[in-house]
Image (cartoon, helix red, strand yellow):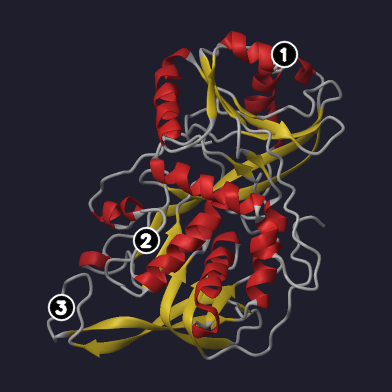
Amino acid sequence: MRFLWEGHESRTHYPSHCDVCIIGGGIMGSAIAFWLKLRAGPAVQVVVVERDSTYRTASTPLSVGGLRQQFSLPENIQMSMFSAQFLRNVNRFLAVEGEEPPDVQFHPQGYLMCAAPDRAARLEENYRTQIENGAKVELMTPARMKERFPWVNTDGVALACHGQENEGWFDPHLLLRAFRRKATHMGVEYVEGEAAGFESRYVANMQVAGRQSVAGGNYVLDRVVVRQADGEVKTVKAAVFVTAAGANTAEVARLAGIGEGEGLLAMPVPVEPRKRYVYFYHSPDGPGLDCPLLVDPTGTYFRREGLGGHYICGKSPTGAVDDPEPDTGDLEVDHGYFQSHIWANLAARVPSFENLKVKSSWAGFYDYNTLDQNAIIGPHPYHHNMFLATGFSGHGIQQAPAVGRAISEHILDGEFRTIDLTRMGFKRVLENKPLLEQNIV
C-alpha cells in the first residue's frame, strides 16, 4: 500500500532523556530532527515521539505534494525556494551510505495560477513580490495561456501566472521515508506513542519572556508523558520540546497549559484539522506531459499523476452554506462532492475532461490556522523551551526542509539565521494581528 511506512522499527526501549524531544514524526518533525543532527551531530541527542509509525492517517503521505513559489508573503516564497533547492539536491542531503539513493519523483512542471477579473490585480501584486524574492514566474494573458497550453479554455480568466522553475510536485511519502531514514541513520531515536501530558520543574530566579513569577522563579517543561498503544506510560525528559503534530498541535499544546491558563497561557494555538478530499481520475484525451498543476479561479485544482491520462484533483470548501467544511471525525470521502463541486469546473477549464472517470479517492487533514491560514514557527512566549511548527494550512509539506532548518537555527543559535521568520511567531496570535497569506489552495 502506498501510504504505509515500510521498514519502521518497533521499539521496546524508550530513552529516558534527550536534549530535544520532537512531538510528531511526520515530514515536519522528521525535517527538524534531520537538521538538528546535521548541524550538531552527536552533541545533541534527539528523540521523536510519533503516535503511529505506519503513518496510515498522517497528513504527509495523504497530501498531493505540491511545490510552488507563488505565494504572497516573502517568507513563504523564500522557504519554498529553499525547499526546491533541497529537493533538487536530495541525494546529497538525505543519501544513506550502503542504501539506494532517495528518489522523491520531483516533476518540475510548475503551477498555473488562474485569476478571474476581480482577482487579477492581486495576482499581479503577488507576482511582483515573487519576482522581488528571486522566483522565476511568468504572467500570462489569456492569449499567452492558449498559446502555451492549447488544451485550456481561458473563459473567465483575466490573468494567470506560471512557475517556470522550481515548481511542480513530488511524492511526499517518499520524502518522509528519506527524512526519517536519514535522521535515524544520524542517531535520531523514534519512539512510538502518544503525547499524554507534560511534567514541569521549578527553576528559581528565571525569567520567561521577560517576566518573573511572584515567587522569583518559573515552572518550565521538563518531561513529556508518552502513552504506548498497550496503555503503558513512559516519560522522556528533555531540555527543549518541539511540537510539530500537524492538525493535532493545539491538543498537544493544551497538555502544556497553552490555552488553559492565564496571561500568556490564555491564548490557545489557533490550529484545527480541516478535511480535504483528493480524487484520482482517468481522462484518455487529457493534457500531456506539459500539464502543470493548474489552480482554477473557482479554487479547483488538478495535476497529472504519472502517465496514461491519469490525474488528481481537489478543492477547498468555501465555507458557504452550499459548500461547508466537512466533518473531521473521520477520513471518509464524500464521493458526491466531486459531482456537485468539482467536475463541472474541471470540464469547463479543460473540455477534454468532460470524458473522465474517477477511479479512487482519499482524504487528509490540513493543519489549518484559523487566524490567518499561515504558519506559526518559533518558541512559545511563556514556555521558552517549547517550539511550535504548525498551522501551514496546506503548504507544510513543501516547506518542511526550510522550516526544519529554521527551527534548528533557533534552538542552536538562539535566532533565525538564513530566513528571518520572526513575523511568523506566536506573538501575532497574542496580539490578534493576522499575517495573511493570500495564495491558499
**Vertical position of residue 311 compared to residue 429: above or below:** above
Which amino acid type corresponds to the residue marked 3 in the rendered image? Gln
The residue that appears at 42% across and 35% down in the rendered structure is 72
Circle 2 — which element?
loop
Quadrant including the N terminus? bottom right
Q: CA distance from mark 2 to mark 1?
A: 45 Å
Residue 401: x and y in percent read: 55, 57
On the image, which quarter does residue 310 sit in? top right
- Visible residue check, residue 74: yes
Residue 78: x and y in percent read: 46, 45
**Vertical position of residue 171 compared to residue 29: above or below:** above
Residue 223: x and y in percent read: 43, 84
> Local crowd at mark 1 within 10 Å, few (<14), some, or many (≥20)?
few
The residue indicated by pointer 3 is 212
Sequence-wise, the earlier of marks 2 and 3 is 3
The residue indicated by pointer 1 is 150
